[in-house]
Image (tube, rainbow, N blue to C red):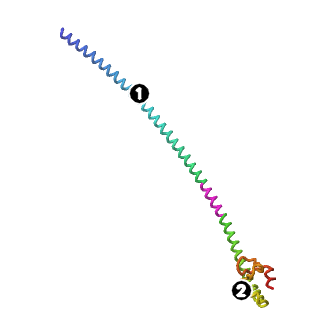
Amino acid sequence: EAEAEALGGLFVDAQSHLKNLMAEASRVRETVERLRNTSRDGLDELRLKVEQEGLETREIANKLHYELDEMVHHRVSALDTAIEDMAQVQRFKDRKQQSQLDAVESDVVSLGANLSKLAQPWQTLKLNCLQRRPGCAKYLERGGRAKSPSKAPTAVGAYRGSIQLDTQDLRHLW
């Protein structure tokens, strides 16, 4: 009996020890489960924060993209307007220059026509002068220059043998 009591006490100790171990295992399981739930809640909270930050980041990126597109569009539009203005100014300058060139061309044609009209009367005057006064021939041979500067007729034209003569030239010749 002493042995049975000793063995019974041993079983009681082993049984109480098993109960204690089971209770400890249950507490560890509960602690692990609580920690898992807390971790899950923390992870869920972190996932939500990450998703929210991702949405905010996308929203900011879209806003920046829109603002950049708007700025680029505005600058391209301003550049296009400036180029068009420059082209219009250039066209105006080109038309003005062409008008001036046309006027110069008209003046040159008119001058040529007037000079060709004066050629025959000049030849006639020259022949008449040569026939009337022998001194005229020498005057004309010298290119219309007098021997002395005081007797020189004044020519209105800027080149030698000018077509237009002053009235003093004609008086000197006659």
Instruction: Specify the principal SS of the magenta part.
Output: helix
Q: Answer above or below: position of 61 versus 155.
A: above
Residue placed most toward the observer, 76 or 145 = 145
Q: Amino acid at mark 2?
A: Glu
**How far apart, in angstroms, are the residues tagged by discs 1 and 2?**
127 Å
> Mark 1 highlights which residue?
38
Q: Position of residue 111 (x, y in %)?
A: 72, 77
Residue at horizontal 79 percent and vertical 79 percent from the top: 166
> On the image, which quarter does residue 145 sit in?
bottom right
Instruction: Relative to 133, say whether 63 is above or below.
Output: above
Residue at x-position 65% and y-position 64%: 91
Residue type, numbered disc 1? Thr
Picture layout, residue 92 above or below residue 68: below
Number of labels in the image equals 2
Location of residue 96 in the rendering, given as x and y in whole percent from the top left corner: 68, 66
In this rendering, position of residue 28 left or right of residue 97: left
Tell me the residue that label 2 is attached to: 141
Q: Is 168 left or right of 45, judged from the image as shown?
A: right
Region rendered in magenta: 79-91
